[in-house]
Amino acid sequence: MDNKEIIQILKLTASLLELYGENQFKVRSYQTAVYNLERNAQELIGLGEKQLAELPGVGKSIAATIREISQTGVSSTLDNLLKQTPKGILELLKVKGVGARKIKTVWDQLGVETAEELLSAATRGELAELSGFGKKTQDRIQQIISFYLSNKHLIHYKDADHLGLSLEQQIKLQFPDARWSRAGSFRRKVEVVESLDYVWASDRIGEAEDFLDSMQGLDKNLQLSGPLRWRGEFRDNSELLDVRFCNLSEFGAKLIYYTGNMEHLALTNEQGKSLREVLEQSHSDESTAYSEIGWPVIIPELREGLYENEFLSGHKMEDILVTEDLKGILHNHSTYSDGKHSLEDMARACKDLGYEYLGISDHSQTAVYANGLNEEKVLEQHREIDRLNQELTPFKIFKGIESDILSDGSLDYSEPILHTFDFVVASVHFNLNMDVDKATERLLRAVKNPNTTILGHPTGRLLLKREGYPIDHQKVIDACAHRGVVIELNANPWRLDLDWRWVHYAVEKGVKISINPDAHEMDTLEDVYYGVCVARKSGLTKVMTFNAMSLEEMDHYLSTRKSKISLHSNV
Ligand SMILES: [Zn+2]
Ligand SMILES: [Zn+2]
């Protein structure tokens, strides 16, 4: 059992204790432990009760619970709570933004036990009548639950990617010569996907089907499967698997057909011939099918029917960004704020990955919940960066900050402190319930601030969990273009914000895109890959990617921009 699983148990216990109205202190003690343990790199499993109790945020009683979990694999406190709780209520507890106490009220007073029932009760206006609710809360819950239900069957690309890799490993072992490929939105690397799609070509389709039938952890859905199609679920998480079989001679054509969306397949060449027509004949390779229409193989990410023509006529496919083009990564956290690993660990890990620089941008002072840095801490961190830069040279750490954009759109420090940073990522983290005018105005003010280098995760969305605040994308992007502000494509698989559908417009306006993992620990530095995946969907080129700049170029860019700040300050 690893730390993650132990923390998961504590987290669920906290929610259930809150649900059943346990006293606030007890609930808080679990929440504090979870918060601290998530930022603790030490392995919990081998620790004794005494050592556990000495960890920050872990008291005696939680230490005993952790010990029990590491020895038995379960927590008796949690087990007792689970026995009294219906499955639907557990599901509701995972939905962000409703709250355990409110769930208990609707359960007790309206008999609501599932997300669907909660939505119906809200639609019928029954929630507004409950004490502590009102019309506004009812509307908010209705919005949250409909968002949840409409996304319930979707999976993050990163999760799908991992699941796919382990399945593929087994296929490779069993059928080393088989021709198969990912397909559909899964192959197009859409940020969230409905199912893991594959096309599998074989002369022995029966054997391939039998293999999937007998694979542990997969459940076949007989009703949805057919002679050339295997559909079912991954048992643990109920993600869908959809495999289409074909003959080797038609692999290329089938793969194009099942990868591109409708718009892609409807694209035509100058003679008016559509891709769909070409696919009516057999092609064993994608390249022969595309060449018949006069095109090179279009990278799967681009097959959305949006920017293919532009690439075919102007840019080359090779111009599109790949992860190796990134020379450094900006926007990362350390233990100075809410990160799990020290500044030095983060820098060394980044260097080991082959990058030339790391931008560290811990949270600013207003972000108390994330241990934001006061001015003194900022200066202390800068001293450490100076020391590390001497040691790690030619690798460089840039001094950054993720400054909260306050409610009125201003940044979080006094001017003299803001001037000490090499770069500032400006992001919104609180007061998220804004209408589009207010949210846009708030961002515009931050963009106009000459200290802002990068606009961080512009909508604050958490995919499948929380909608972002509404913004007028065009206005915000235009302002960034006007002020020379870079826009972040936050590569955290939960965010992928700026949405790739707006990246193209930003680039058209001359705005560079910075792909940042927003890593809070060493492991997630590599999440930058998922940002690149979606950036490629918009056709983002290396030239327009901010952190594809070499160390020398970045150094020059940041110092030049900084020297202009005082000139702009009065604008
Ligand atoms: Zn942030
Ligand atoms: Zn951040």
Image (cartoon, helix red, strand yellow):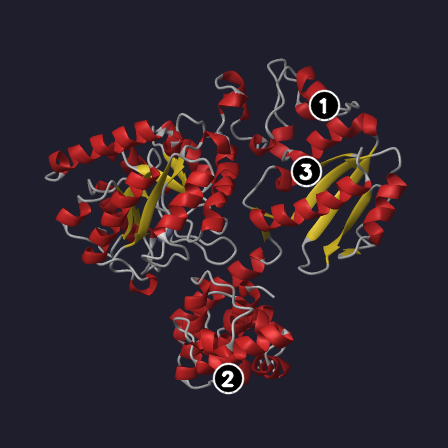
Disc 2 marks a residue whose amino acid type is: Tyr
Please state the horizontal and vertical placement of residue 33, each as a whole percent of the image.
43, 72
**The N terminus: image quadrant:** bottom right
> Image quadrant of residue 570?
top left
The residue under label 1 is 277
Q: Cβ of disc 2 within 8 Å of ligand 1?
A: no
Q: Which of the image's four quarters has the C terminus? A: top left
- What residue is shown at x 19% (from left), y 40% (from top)? 450
Residue type marked 1: Glu
Q: Secondary structure at mark 1?
A: helix
The CA distance from mark 1 to mark 3 is 19 Å
Q: Are marks 1 and 2 in contact (CB under 8 Å)?
A: no
User: At 24% from the left edge and 59% from the top edge, which residue is drawn?
Assistant: 365
Q: Position of residue 522 (x, y in %)?
A: 45, 50
Q: Which amino acid type is marked by label 3?
A: Ala
**Image x and y of residue 155, in percent:** 59, 52
Mark nearest the camera among 1 and 2 is: 2
Q: Is residue 350 above or below residue 39?
A: above
Q: Which numbered marker is on residue 555?
A: none
Query: Could you tell me if the residues under marks 1 and 3 are in contact, i.e. CB atoms within 8 Å?
Result: no
Q: Residue 289's image quarter?
A: top right
Image position, residue 281 (x, y; %): 78, 22
Q: State the CA–CA distance, disc 1 to disc 2.
A: 61 Å
- 499 lies above or below 35: above
Choose mark 1 or mark 3, whichever is in front.
3
Can you see residue 271?
yes
The residue where tag 2 is placed is 20
Residue on which the image places disc 3: 183
Q: CA distance from mark 2 to mark 3?
A: 45 Å
Q: Is residue 139 visible?
A: no
Query: What residue sits 59% from the left and 31% below the top?
Result: 303
